[in-house]
Amino acid sequence: MSDIRERVFVACPLAHARRYLARVLPVDSPAPQRLELRLPVPVPGAAGAGLEHEVIATWSPAQDPTHESEPWHLSWAPRNRRLYPSFDGTLAIMAGEDYESCRLVLEGSYVPPLGVAGEVFDAAVGRRIAEATGRELLRTIASRMEEAYRADAAQKQAPGGEPSD
């Protein structure tokens, strides 16, 4: 089993982050949610090159006993289970370095596919691919959150403008 922990900063205040995350992923439901996602699989050493694979992701609210984050249990299983690992972990919103930002943190574990051969591949390059995939997923979510936040901020600046939900 391999562990990953990735984080990205989001140019969106922590106080509003849940609302903007809910525009990307339906996180407001107390019941587990399912969604088909296409995850990028960056290829190390090949700038801009990569693959994609489809996963069925599920998430549900989780608890942080330290109250430092707002987490969701997140897991996914790839459609092609022979080539790609399943993942089990958390996606959390945490405070950023200032009042104008927050962090998205993805942490969890996966079991490399293909048994012993998969473990060898994971030790050589697979782990870097898994980390890059997690980072790219977070960047995509963060980018969409930031776009929505900026659009609402611009609308507030317009005469008589109110943000939409």
Image (spheres, helix red, strand yellow):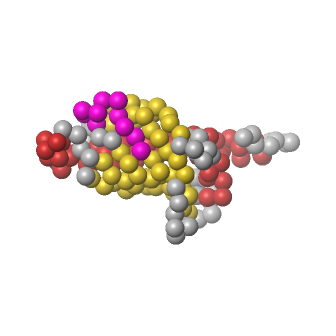
**Residue 88 drawn in magenta:** no
Q: Is residue 146 left or right of residue 107?
A: right
Q: Is residue 94 left or right of residue 47?
A: right
Question: Could you say where residue 158 lies in the image, as x and y percent from the top left?
Answer: 80, 42
Q: Using the image, determine if residue 14 lies above or below residue 137.
A: below
**Which residues, given as a range, are shown in magenta?**
75-84
Between residues 154 and 122, which one lies in front from this camera angle? 122
Question: Could you say where residue 33 lies in the image, as x and y percent from the top left?
Answer: 53, 40
Residue shown at the point (17%, 42%) measured from the top left: 115
Question: Could you say where residue 141 lies in the image, as x and y percent from the top left?
Answer: 51, 43
Quarter of the view holding residue 29: top right
Residue 121 appears in the figure: no
Question: Could you say where residue 44 lies in the image, as x and y percent from the top left?
Answer: 26, 42
Secondary structure predominantly adopted by residues drawn in magenta? loop
Between residues 4 and 44, which one lies in front from this camera angle? 4
**Residue 77 drawn in magenta:** yes
Q: Using the image, determine if residue 29 lies above or below residue 67.
A: above
Q: How many marks can you see?
A: 0
The single residue placed furthest to the right in the displayed view is 160
Between residues 111 and 20, which one lies in front from this camera angle? 111
